Image (tube, grey):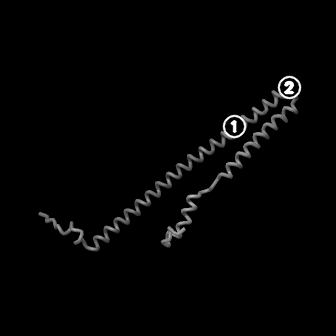
Amino acid sequence: MSHHDPQLDDPSTRSLSNVGDIFADISRDLSTLIRQETELAKAEVRESATRAGTGAGMLGGAGVAGHFVLLFLSIALWWGLGSSIGRGWSALVVAVIWAAVAAVLASMGRAKLKQVKGIPQTTATAREIPDALRGNEDKR
């Protein structure tokens, strides 16, 4: 009959080698977990990148198709106006319309770019790190 030693269950009587073994096991398990999580993250990033690349390619194709739609609509407008005001003048009218669209889009784009603030919160937090490490985080 095996006899159970109650001293083995008492944390105060465990030997230091057992504690060392426990820490070694924890360290090994944590290392394995981190390695597995890293591999999982790499696989997920690869899958996401593949999907993003496919999506970007499709959006690029949609952009080219949209360009052709605008091109042929412009040709149709030029041709339609040409029967009443002449082909030369109708081409000029279509060009002026596109110049106006380009000017409006450029102006709106410039205004949006001026609103870009970058990453203000991250920049502010990063500036506080050296002070925090020195224990002076409240001195700003």
Q: Residue at x 66, y 41 (%)?
A: 61
In the image, 39: left or right of 92?
left
Label 1 sits on a secondary structure element that is helix
In the foreground, 31 or 139:
139
Does residue 34 sit above or below 7 in this rendering?
Answer: above
Q: Residues within 10 Å of mark 2 (few under 14, many from 20)?
A: few
Position above or below: 93 against 110:
above
* Depth order, front residue of 43/120: 120
Q: Which circle's residue, 2 or 1, is located before the other in the chain? A: 1
In the rendered structure, the answer to whether residue 92 lies left or right of residue 59 reads right
The image shows residue 41 at horizontal and vertical percentages of: 48, 55
Q: Position of residue 93 (x, y in %)?
A: 83, 34
Q: At label 1, which amino acid type do we have?
A: Gly
Front-most of residues 94 and 60: 94
Circle 1 Cα neighbour tier, 10 Å, few/some/many (<14 / 14–19 / ≥20): few
* Residue at 75% in and 40% down: 101
Residue furthest toward the left?
1
Which residue carries the number 2 mark? 84
Q: Are the residues flagged by discs 2 and 1 in contact, CB closer than 8 Å?
A: no
- Name the quadrant of the C terminus: bottom right
